[in-house]
């Protein structure tokens, strides 16, 4: 009996000490991890909205954003952040909208979309992607992402047949699921911009 009690006390002590050590490690690493994540986002903001010299977070209602996307058919996407980009004179040049998609082949991916004040998509940058190497990971290559760049359309659609049009995105061979996830995520950003940020679209036509 004494041996059982002794072993129990030892295991309890090990568990307590391990828990304390994990807590200490978490406290030490959480700040650098958070800073690294913020740096990644800032780099993405600058990449997708290069005309902006500074960015400021915009308050948004996550539930309202989710309802808006669902109403427009984007039930697997979630708006995770919105920032306003301004130039050196303080004028708003556009917004960066971050979207997480649950439609990726690997489960989820997250990207940022830069949208100018006239509704033109200025760039797309991945924040988190872990698709299949040589297939879905091609979505993070410039050749694919630049298909969205400098396009002013209401929404994008992917094509497997090479159809022409500013709104047409060539699908990645062997990675239709990833292509669909990225395209829908970009379209989700456009839907949010067009409905919630007072943006104009389609060549400057004001969205009433």
Image (cartoon, rainbow, N blue to C red):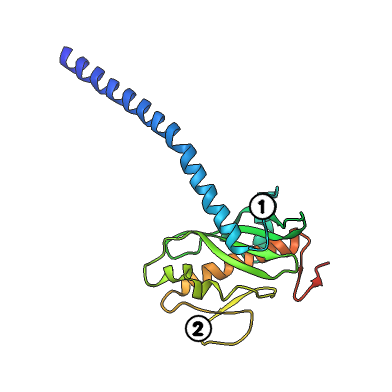
| 18 relative to 204 in the view: left or right | left
Q: Nearer the viewer, residue 74 or 178?
A: 178
| Residue 11 vs residue 49, the one in the foreground | 49
Query: In the image, what residue occupies the spot 66% across and 54% down?
Result: 82
Residue occupied by mark 2: 160
- Left or right: residue 160 compared with residue 189: left
Distance of label 1 from label 2 (alpha carbons): 36 Å
Q: Residues within 10 Å of mark 1 (few under 14, many from 20)?
A: many
Q: Which mark is residue 39?
A: none
- Kindly state the secondary structure of the residue where label 1 is placed: strand
- The residue under label 1 is 55
Location of residue 193 in the rendering, given as x and y in whole percent from the top left corner: 71, 62
In which quadrant of the rendered view does residue 148 lie?
A: bottom right
Kindly report which numbered mark, 1 or 2, lies closer to the viewer in this rendering.
1
- Please give the name of the residue rendered at 56% of the width and 74% of the height, measured from the top-left corner: 146
Q: Residue at x 68, y 49 (%)?
A: 56
Q: Evaluate whether residue 166 shows in this view.
A: yes
Q: Residue at x 73, y 56 (%)?
A: 88
Number of numbered discs visible in the structure rendering:
2
- Locate residue 154 relative to residue 21 in the image: left or right: right
Query: Is label 2 in a helix, a strand or a loop?
Result: loop
Q: Is residue 42 above or below residue 166?
A: above
Quadrant of the snapshot with the C terminus: bottom right
Which quadrant: the N terminus?
Answer: top left
Mark before the other along the chain sequence, 1 or 2: 1
Q: Is residue 10 above or below residue 202?
A: above
Query: Is residue 75 something that shows in the picture?
Result: no
Give the percent coordinates (x, y) of residue 25.
39, 33
Work out which residue is located at the far top of the displayed protein and give it: 2
Residue 203 image point, x, y percent: 76, 76
Q: Are marks 1 and 2 in contact (CB under 8 Å)?
A: no
């Amino acid at each position: 009996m004494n041996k059982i009690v002794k072993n129990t006390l030892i295991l309890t002590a090990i568990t307590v000490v391990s828990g304390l050590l994990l807590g200490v490690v978490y406290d030490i690493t959480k700040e650098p991890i958070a800073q690294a994540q913020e740096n990644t986002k800032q780099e993405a903001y600058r990449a997708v909205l290069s005309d902006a010299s500074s960015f400021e977070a915009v308050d948004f209602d996550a539930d309202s954003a989710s309802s808006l996307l669902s109403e427009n058919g984007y039930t697997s996407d979630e708006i995770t952040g919105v920032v306003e980009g301004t130039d050196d004179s303080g004028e708003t040049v556009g917004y960066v909208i971050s979207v997480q998609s649950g439609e990726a082949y690997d489960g989820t991916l997250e990207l940022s979309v830069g949208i100018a004040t006239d509704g033109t998509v200025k760039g797309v940058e991945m924040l988190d992607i872990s698709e299949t190497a040589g297939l879905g990971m091609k979505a993070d290559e410039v050749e694919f992402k630049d298909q969205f760049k400098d396009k002013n359309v209401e929404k994008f659609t992917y094509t497997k047949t090479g159809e022409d049009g500013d709104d047409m995105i060539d699908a990645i061979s062997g990675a239709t699921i990833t292509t669909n996830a990225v395209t829908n995520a970009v379209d989700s950003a456009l839907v949010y911009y067009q409905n919630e940020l007072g943006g104009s679209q389609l060549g400057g036509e004001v969205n009433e």
